[in-house]
Image (spheres, grey):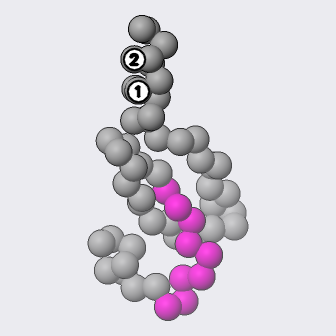
């Protein structure tokens, strides 16, 4: 029964993501996932507006 409860809780946890290499990345978007979130690197920021980063 404990394993079943832990399995249910595990599905709510965010997945592990690779750390961002800030030497290669100049911007990132915050992506929400369940009760947490993660930063997603933006490869091309030439056409990215501030509203897209904030919003």
Above or below for 17 versus 30: above
Q: Secondary structure at mark 1?
A: helix
Q: Which residues are magenta?
A: 39-47
Residue at mark 2: 5
Answer with left or right where residue 20 lies relative to residue 36: right
21 in the magenta segment: no
Residue found farthest to the top? 1
Along the viewing direction, whichever of 12 and 8 lies nearer the viewer: 8
Could you tell me residue 1's position as x and y percent? 42, 8
Residue at mark 1: 8
Circle 2 packing at 10 Å, graded few (<14), some (14-19), many (20+), is few
Could you tell me residue 13's position as x and y percent? 44, 35
Instruction: Identify which residue is drawn at 35% across, 45% down.
Output: 34
Instruction: Identify which residue is drawn at 42% across, 58% down.
Output: 31
For the residues labelled 2 and 1, the Cα–Cα distance comes to: 5 Å
Q: Secondary structure at mark 2?
A: helix
Q: Are marks 2 and 1 in contact (CB under 8 Å)?
A: yes
| Quadrant of the drawing holding the C terminus | bottom left
Above or below for 13 versus 54: above
Above or below for 27 versus 9: below
Instruction: Identify which residue is drawn at 47% across, 24% down.
Output: 7
Count of picture labels = 2
Instruction: Identify which residue is drawn at 41% across, 60% down.
Output: 30
Circle 1 packing at 10 Å, graded few (<14), some (14-19), many (20+), is few
Answer with left or right where residue 18 lies relative to residue 38: right
Along the viewing direction, whichever of 7 and 20 lies nearer the viewer: 7
């Amino acid at each position: 029964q404990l394993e079943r409860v832990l399995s249910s809780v595990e599905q709510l946890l965010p997945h592990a993501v690779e750390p961002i290499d800030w030497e290669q990345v100049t911007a990132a978007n915050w992506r929400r996932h369940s009760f947490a979130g993660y930063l997603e690197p933006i490869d091309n920021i030439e056409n990215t507006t501030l509203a897209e980063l904030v919003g």
